[in-house]
Amino acid sequence: MAAPNPLDGFTVEPAGLSYVGEGLQRPECILAERDGSLWSADARGGVVHIRPDGTQRLVTQTEATDFSAATDEETRFVSGTLPNGLAFARNGDILISNFGTDRLEIMTRDGASRVLADSIDGAPIGKVNFVLRDSRDRIWLTISTRIKNWMRAMSPNVADGYIALYDQGRLRIVADGFRFTNEIRLDAKEEWLYVAETCGRHVTRLRVQPDGSLTDREVFGPSDHGAFIDGIAFDAHGNLWGTHVMTDRIFALTPEGDLRILLDDDKDSAAGRTLMDAFAADAATPELMLACGGTIAPWFASITFGGPDLRTVYVGSLRGTRIPAFRSPVAGLPMAHW
C-alpha cells in the first residue's frame, strides 16, 4: 500500500503567509542556502542577497533602471536586462538566464559577470528563461521563444521554445517544439526532466539519457491546467509543486499526476476568465495579461524550498516587491548545491 501523501488535506492560508525582502524588482526566481540566505533575481541587473537577519544588498555591476524607469507596463516587461532563472554554479557563483539580454551569464557574488552563451548554431539564442545545474555539473537551459517580444509568443499556436544543454563549453539543442518553455526540474534520480510549458498549459517530461539527449516525451498530469504554468519544484515525496502565473495559484501534481490546488489568489476572477478566453481564440494581449494578478504578490512565478529543513516555501513573482513564504508539511527535494 502506498504511503500517505504529506499534502493530503493541506492548503495554504493567505493569512498565514509571512514576507521576506522589501523594495525588490521582479523577484522572479529565488535561490536558498542552508544558512537561511536568499538570492533573488532583480530587474536592476543582478540579484538581491537577503541575509538570514533580513538585511539585504543589491549585487550588480551597474544598476540598471530600465525596469523602474519604463513609461508603460508592457515596455517594463520586455526590455532591458531582466535576470530571470538562477542557479548556483559549483563554486558558488550565480548562473543567470537573462530574459532581457537573451544570454546565459555567470556572476560572482561581488558582481563580476561574463557571458557563457548568447548564440546557438550561429543564430541568436532567443528568450533565455531558466537555468538548472545537475549533479554532473551540466547546465540545462530553457528558451521560451525565438520571438523578441515574448508577449507576442503568448499564443496556443506558437511552439518555438526549446531546451539546450551547456556541457564542456558547448551549447546544443536537446529538445525542441515547446509552447513557451519555462522552468525545468529533474526528479530525485535525475532520470526524467520535467518541463513547464506555459502556453501548452501543462507539464511535459522527457527521459534523460547518459549523453544528455532527451527521449520518451509525454505529458505529466492534466493535459490542460486551464492556466499558464511558470515555476515548478519537487518535494521529497515526489510531488511536483508549481505556479499558475497571472491567475496566481500554487498547485501540486502528485506522483500519480493528480492536480491539487494549494493556494488560489485569483478565485476565478473575471480578468482571469477573460484572458483565458482570449488566449483560446489566439487573441491574448498585453493589456489583458496585465489586468490579471492577485493581491499577495502579482504574477506568481517560482517555487523555492529553503530553510535548514527545506520546509519553508518561497514564492517568486514578476510584479511583486517582496517574497511570500509559508511552511510546508514536507521538505523540498535538495538541489545540486545542497
Image: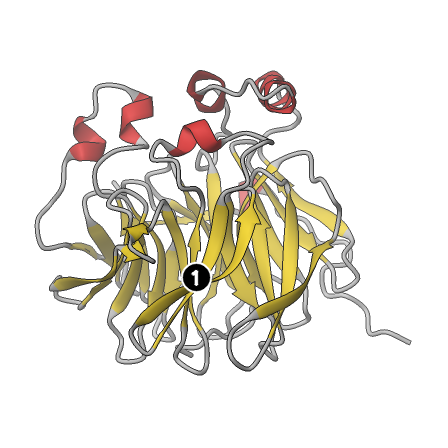
Disc 1 marks which residue? 164
Please state which of residues 241 and 100 is positioned toward the viewer in this rendering. Answer: 100
| Quadrant in the picture for residue 172 | bottom left
Vertical position of residue 220 compared to residue 199: above or below: below
Residue found 63% across the figure and 64% down from its top: 206
Residue found 35% across the figure and 43% down from its top: 322
Q: What element does badge 1 sit on?
A: strand
Is 300 left or right of 70, judged from the image as shown?
right
The residue lying furthest to the front in this view is: 122
The C terminus sits in image quarter: bottom left
Estimate the x, y position of residue 330 in percent, counting from the top left.
63, 67
Estimate the x, y position of residue 305 in percent, counting from the top left.
49, 64
| Quadrant in the picture for residue 24 | top left
Please state which of residues 287 and 8 is positioned toward the viewer in this rendering. Answer: 287
The residue lying furthest to the right in this view is: 1
Please state which of residues 176 and 305 is positioned toward the viewer in this rendering. Answer: 176
Neighbours of disc 1 within 10 Å: few (<14), some (14-19), many (20+): many
The color scheme shown is secondary structure
Can residue 327 be seen in the rendering of this structure?
no
Please state which of residues 157 and 203 is positioned toward the viewer in this rendering. Answer: 157
Is 153 left or right of 156, judged from the image as shown?
left
Q: What amino acid is found at the position of numbered circle 1 in the picture?
A: Ala
| Quadrant in the picture for residue 216 | bottom right
Is 207 left or right of 22, judged from the image as shown?
right
Estimate the x, y position of residue 92 in percent, counting from the top left.
27, 75
The residue lying furthest to the left in this view is: 62
Can residue 94 be seen in the rendering of this structure?
yes
Residue found 54% across the figure and 35% down from its top: 158
The N terminus sits in image quarter: bottom right
